[in-house]
Image (cartoon, rainbow, N blue to C red):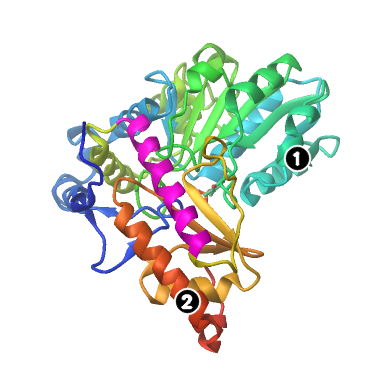
Amino acid sequence: MTQLPKKHLFDIPEGMIYLDGNSLGPLPKGAAERATKTLTQEWGTQLIKAWNTADWMALPQKVGDRIAGFIGAAPGSVATGDTLSIKVYQALAAALKMRPDRRVILSDTGNFPSDLYMAQGLISTIGKDYELRTVAPEDVAEAITEDVAVVMLTEVDYRTGRRHDMTELTARAHQAGAVMIWDLAHSAGALPVDLTGCNAEFAVGCTYKYFNGGPGAPAFIYARPDILLEVEPALSGWLGHDAPFAMEPGYRPAMTTERLRVGTPPIVQLSILDAALDVWDGVSMDEIRGASVALCESFITEVEARCPQLTLASPRDAVVRGSQVSFAFEEGYPVMQALIERGVIGDFRAPNILRFGFTPLYIDQDDVIAAAKVLEDVMTSESWKDPKYQVRSRVT
Ligand SMILES: *Cc1c(COP(=O)(O)O)cnc(C)c1O
C-alpha cells in the first residue's frame, strides 16, 4: 500500500492548509521541472522541429490515454485540448445531431453555469426550437421523458458536492432514447469513475482541479468507442482532420478520437499535466476515495462540534457526496476571507457557500483538525466582521 499523503511531491507554501484543490490544484514539483525542460530544451533549442523531435504531436493522445486510466475509459477514447466549456459545446452539438427528431437538452439547476451557458449559446446558433430544460437535481430521473434528446449532467455538484448516480441515470436516459453526457469536472481524480461500465456516450472534464495540471490546463472529452464514427464534430478544426498535413480544402474527420481535437495543442500545459500525473504513480482511485471520505467525515464532525453557526450544505451520506464539504452561512464571503488570511484556503460560492475540497494526495487528518480550529476561532471571535474582509475580489 502506498503512503498517502504525498505532500513532499508538491510545492505548497509553509503554513498553508490548501483546501481548494477542487478549484485549482497546487504545483507538483516535477511539473515545474518539466515546464522548464519544455521551454528551454525543446522550444528554445529545437524550435519547430520539436513537433517531431520532442514528439509534441503525440502528447495530446499520450495524456488522453493517461486520463482514460483514471475514469474507466479504454485507451484511445479520450482526446485532450481546449477548455472544458469548449468540450461541453462539442459533446452537446454532436449528441444533438445523434437525435435529429428531438429538441430538448435536459440538465439540472445545480449544474455549473458555464455548462448551461454553452447549451444556451449552442441553441441560439442552431435554432430557437431547441430548448434547455433544467430541473432540480433530485428531479432529474423523472424528467427524462421521450422528448429529451440529450441529458447533460455534472456528476458532483460544484457548490454542495451532491453526487448523481451515473449508472442509474445513464440507464434512464437510454431507456428514454436520449444521449448521455457526463461532466466529470469534480469527479476525475477525486473518486473512481467507470465510464465503460456506465455506458454513457460522452464525458468531459478539466485537469486543473484534482489532476493539478495548473491554471488553464487542457480539458478532455470522451466518446464511447462504438459511437465514435457517428460523432460529427461541430468544431471542425484542422487537427481533428483525418490528414491535417494533406491540407485538403474539405473537412474529413479523423477516424479516431482525434476528431474531437480542434486546433494546435497547448504543449507547455500538456507537458506540465503529463508531469503532474506522475504524482499518482502507485495510487489507486479506491485508495484516494477511501482517504477522501475519511477526511470529509472528520471535517464535518469537527466543524459541527466547533461552529454551531454553520449549516452543512453537503449531503451527510458520504456515498452521495464528492470530495468536498460545503457549509452555508449568510456572511460566508467575509468568513472565507478571514480564513484565507490565516492560511486556510477554501473558497466562497454565491450566494452563501463556504467550500472546502479534500485531496488526499497532500491533505491529512492533522490538516483537517487544524483547519477546523482556525474556522472555530474565526467564528467565535467574529474576526470576520472586520470591514477589510468585505472587499470583493474578481475571483471569489
Ligand atoms: C470548473 C468547471 C468548468 C470550467 O470550465 P472551463 O472552460 O475550464 O473554464 C465547467 N464546468 C464545470 C462543471 C466545472 O466544474
Relative height, residue 67 to residue 108 (above, below): above
Disc number lying in front (1 or 2): 2
The label number, if any, that marks residue 123 in the structure image:
1
Rendering coords of residue 229 (x, y %): 55, 14
**Residue at horizontal 71 percent and vertical 40 percent from the top:** 137
Q: Amino acid at mark 1?
A: Ile
Question: In the rendered view, does 293 fall on the left or right side of 85?
Answer: left
The residue lying furthest to the top in this view is 226
Q: Report the magenta residues as a range.
A: 284-305
Q: Work out whether mark 1 precedes mark 2 in sequence or the reverse, and give the earlier one.
A: 1
The label number, if any, that marks residue 378 in the structure image:
2
Is residue 290 located in the magenta-colored stretch of the structure? yes
Query: Is residue 393 something one can see in this rendering?
Result: no
The residue lying furthest to the front in this view is 305
Rendering coords of residue 150 (x, y %): 71, 28
10 Å crowding of disc 1: few (<14), some (14-19), many (20+): many
The answer to the question of whether label 1 and label 2 lie on touching residues, with beta carbons closer than 8 A, is: no
10 Å crowding of disc 2: few (<14), some (14-19), many (20+): some
The residue lying furthest to the right in this view is 129
Is residue 119 located in the magenta-colored stretch of the structure? no
State the residue in front, 361 or 375.
375
Task: Kindly indicate the quadrant of the structure image that contains residue 328.
Answer: bottom right
Query: Is residue 162 something one can see in this rendering?
Result: yes
Main SS of the magenta segment? Answer: helix
**Residue at horizontal 44 percent and vertical 18 percent from the top:** 256
Q: Amino acid at mark 2?
A: Val
Question: In the rendered view, does 75 fall on the left or right side of 31?
Answer: right
Rendering coords of residue 206 (x, y %): 46, 42
Which element type, helix, strand or loop, lies under badge 2? Answer: helix
**Residue at horizontal 42 percent and vertical 64 percent from the top:** 372
